[in-house]
Amino acid sequence: MSKATILVIDDEKGIRDMLGYTLQQEGYGFISAENGREGLKKALENDIDLVITDIKMPDMEGTEVLEQVKRAKPDVEVIMATGYVTIETSIESLRKGAYDYISKPFNIDEMLMTVGKALEYSRLKKTVIKDGEILGRLRELDTIKTEFLSNVSHELRTPLMSIKNSLDLLADEFNGKLSESGKTLFGVCVRNSVRMGNLVSELMEFSKMESGSFEIKKKKIALKPVVDEVLAEMIPVAGAKKISLLSEFEGGISPGEEINADPDRIKQVLINLTANAVKFTPEGGKITVDVKRLSSPSRGEAPLAGEGGLIEISVTDTGIGISPENLEKVFQKFYQVKAAQSESIKGIGLGLAIAKNIVEAHGGRIWVESGPLPIGPDLSSNGLSGSLPGTKFIFTLPI
Ligand SMILES: Nc1ncnc2c1ncn2[C@@H]1O[C@H](COP(=O)(O)OP(=O)(O)OP(=O)(O)O)[C@@H](O)[C@H]1O
Ligand SMILES: [Mg+2]
């Protein structure tokens, strides 16, 4: 980046020469003018970053120069130079937008320091303005994206429903009449329409969250049936990879004990956590859902809420794990760890962002641990995943 250009306006030739010599020595671009009028003209005509103007000049007051420069070029900083500084002129100049003063005769070091500071200030000011603009534009794009997702997911839903319904009808009509390869192809259609349905629901859910129209309907529920339902739904996918699914209720919580929560939403969180666990755990692994009552606050949690305290639910797997730098990031919308994708494990990276939203809407917290140490299950129980770090997602819910 080339150094800044400075315009010096002073009726004394000695001063102009001295400043010109010093500033050019420092590598600054230098322009000079011998009176206010000429100075203003040069200020407007040239691409300058800073003005040093004398206050007392025969044709025009320095403060007048200051005002006009600031009006025409607000980004240009102006330093006032004067032989005698009165409080009145100082205040007046500062009020009119001067950056600072230097007093004559100049102390070269002080003068260069003030020039440096003024230029830095002007640079920072421009950056802040630029950042503000970028932020505004990013927000705008984010809104457009959310609206787009909402429209697209709604539009996809209708034809998808008709594909699903047609597949159901076809299944009724041709059940048993299909050849082996026909059955395989039919299975592909059904599985993919289900997968696409899940994707569309996830997108719709997400756009609802982004637009603030997402609702939680709390009621008294027992967790055990919710956990059982989730595990039952996961059996086919987990079974295909010979992954075992377990659940445990401990820490003084009885399986029938009720908490105040939205059962569909909690199920949704657990489905995503267990589906992730299955996706990122190799064949023969193990997934455990643990539910316990917390006797003490966990990870900076507020003291136990209400009279009932907190329930902690965790999903632990024996899979590939998450590296420390990604532990926070996985909760960001659309974030996926690169390595996982190479194993053709698809998804759109919204599951955890949605889960976090749901847990927080219940007044809970969600986080993840990975690595050999904090993980509960015995990793050596099977040869395949024994050497993997495993992952444990934990969330809390007030009772
Ligand atoms: N149990 C896990 N083990 C290892 N990595 C995980 C685990 N759970 C999540 N991740 C990482 O976090 C990322 C984000 O997870 P998230 O559930 O938000 O999205 P996804 O599963 O990729 O897609 P989606 O849930 O939208 O279908 C995953 O892509 C993966 O890289
Ligand atoms: Mg997921």
Image: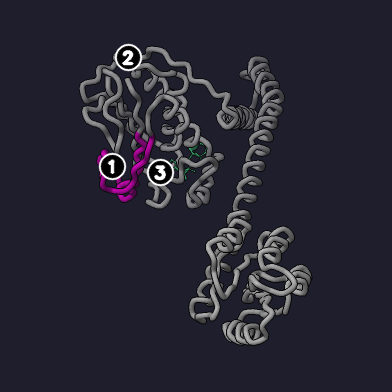
Q: Is 331 left, or right, of 244 in this rendering?
A: right
The image position of residue 347, as x and y in percent, is: 55, 39
Q: Residues within 10 Å of mark 2 (few under 14, many from 20)?
A: some
Q: How far apart are labels 3 and 1 at the CA level?
A: 17 Å
Q: Is 136 left, or right, of 385 in this rendering?
A: right
User: Which numbered marker is on residue 282?
Assistant: 3
* Residue lying at 72% horizontally and 79% vertically, measured from the top left: 34
Q: Secondary structure at mark 1?
A: loop
Picture layout, residue 116 above or below residue 180: below
Q: Residues within 10 Å of mark 1 (few under 14, many from 20)?
A: some
User: Which numbered marker is on residue 375?
Assistant: 1
Q: How far apart are labels 3 and 2 at the CA level?
A: 35 Å
| Residue span colored magenta | 366-394
Residue type of the residue flagged with mark 2 = Glu
Quadrant of the rendered structure where residue 288 is? Answer: top left
Front residue of 318/28: it is 28
The image position of residue 282, as x and y in percent, is: 40, 43
The image position of residue 172, as x and y in percent, is: 64, 15
Quadrant of the rendered structure where residue 51 is? Answer: bottom right
Mark 3 vs 2, N-terminal side: 2
Q: Nearer the viewer, mark 1 or mark 2?
A: 2
Picture layout, residue 93 above or below residue 223: below
Q: Secondary structure at mark 2?
A: strand
User: Which numbered marker is on residue 357?
Assistant: none
Q: Is 154 left, or right, of 353 in this rendering?
A: right
Residue that mark 2 sits on: 258
Q: Residues within 10 Å of mark 3 (few under 14, many from 20)?
A: some
Mark 3 vs 1, N-terminal side: 3
Quadrant of the image containing the N terminus: bottom right
* Residue lying at 62% horizontally and 28% vertically, measured from the top left: 193
